[in-house]
Image (cartoon, grey):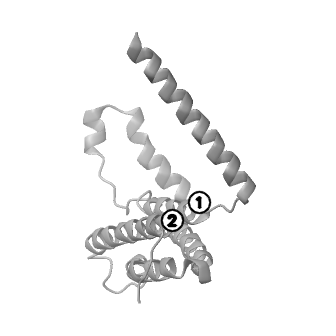
């Protein structure tokens, strides 16, 4: 039995595996950064468990792209964005505007004063990594490069391509003579 993989499937799987690699790296970082928060609280486990699931689910959905995998990936990547937004809420302790103002305040003070600021809160913008990864996944799953064209369109494109190739070779022959 011979398995044939076309170019579009290869590119799609490469995209899915790359994004799964992003989830793997994010999981490693989150596990380290949440090491103290994991004790006695269920919320820090959410992104770790989610990343673990995405590492395995996204390539499986990529394999079954034409049989519902595309829809499954879109749902999973939308959930990724939602997790990022929920994470921002959790990291801000319900005070999102104040925490973002705190983070952006370093742009309005000197470097020496900015270095002296010590935040007692989790990084409020860190969960945006999930939002970005989710949007990248949605973008990758939204593009479907396979197009069906009629034989007439193919023949016309072929004639146009042949005519362009002939013009280029004639132009290069003329410039070579000069």
Q: Nearer the viewer, residue 127 or 37?
A: 127
Q: Residue at x 55, y 76 (%)?
A: 76
Q: Residue furthest top?
A: 178
* Mark 2, residue position: 8
Q: Is residue 129 above or below residue 42?
A: above
- Label 1: which secondary element: loop
Task: Find numbered disc 2 in the image and state the secondary structure of the residue it sits on.
Answer: helix
Q: Position of residue 61 (x, y in %)?
A: 51, 80
Mark 2 packing: few (<14 Cα in 10 Å), some, or many (20+)?
few
Residue sitting at the far bottom: 1
At 43% across and 41% down in the image, what residue appears? 105
In the rendered image of this protein, does residue 151 appear above or below residue 23? Answer: above
Quadrant in the picture for the N terminus: bottom left
Q: Residue at x 35, y 69 (%)?
A: 21
Q: Dots 1 and 2: beta carbons under 8 Å?
A: yes
- On the image, which quarter does residue 178 sit in? top left
Answer whether residue 50 is visible to the viewer in this image.
Answer: no
Residue 91, how many percent across, how many down? 44, 66
The circle drawn on residue 145 is 1
Name the side, left or right, on which 19 lies relative to 155. Answer: left
**Residue 26 at what x, y percent from top left?**
34, 68
Q: State whether residue 59 is above or below residue 120.
A: below
- Answer whether residue 155 is visible to the viewer in this image: yes
Mark 1 vs mark 2, CA separation in Å: 7 Å
Tell me which corner region of the image, top left, top right, bottom left or bottom right, holds residue 161. top right
| Residue 133 locus on image (x, y percent) | 46, 63
Front residue (pair 22, 164): 164
User: Image point 53% across, 58% down: which residue?
Assistant: 96
For label 1, count other residues whose C-alpha is less than 10 Å away and answer few (under 14), some (14-19) or many (20+): few
Going from the N terminus, do you reach mark 1 or mark 2 first?
2
- 77 left or right, relative to 38: right
Q: Nearer the viewer, residue 146 or 63?
A: 146
């Amino acid at each position: 039995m011979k398995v044939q993989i076309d170019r579009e499937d290869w590119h799609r799987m490469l995209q899915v595996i790359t994004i799964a690699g992003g989830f793997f790296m994010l999981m490693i970082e989150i596990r380290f950064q949440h090491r103290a928060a994991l004790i006695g609280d269920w919320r820090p486990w959410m992104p770790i468990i989610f990343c673990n699931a995405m590492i395995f689910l996204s390539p499986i959905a990529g394999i079954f792209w034409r049989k519902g995998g595309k829809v499954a990936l879109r749902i999973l990547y939308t959930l990724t964005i939602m997790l990022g937004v929920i994470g921002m809420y959790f990291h801000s302790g319900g005070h999102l505007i104040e925490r973002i103002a705190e983070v952006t305040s370093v742009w309005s003070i000197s470097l020496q004063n900015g270095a002296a600021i010590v935040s007692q809160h989790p990084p409020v913008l860190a969960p945006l990594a999930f939002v970005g990864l989710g949007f990248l996944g949605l973008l990758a799953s939204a593009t479907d490069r396979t197009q069906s064209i009629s034989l007439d369109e193919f023949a016309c494109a072929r004639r146009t391509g042949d005519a362009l190739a002939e013009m280029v070779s004639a132009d290069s022959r003329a410039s070579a003579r000069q």
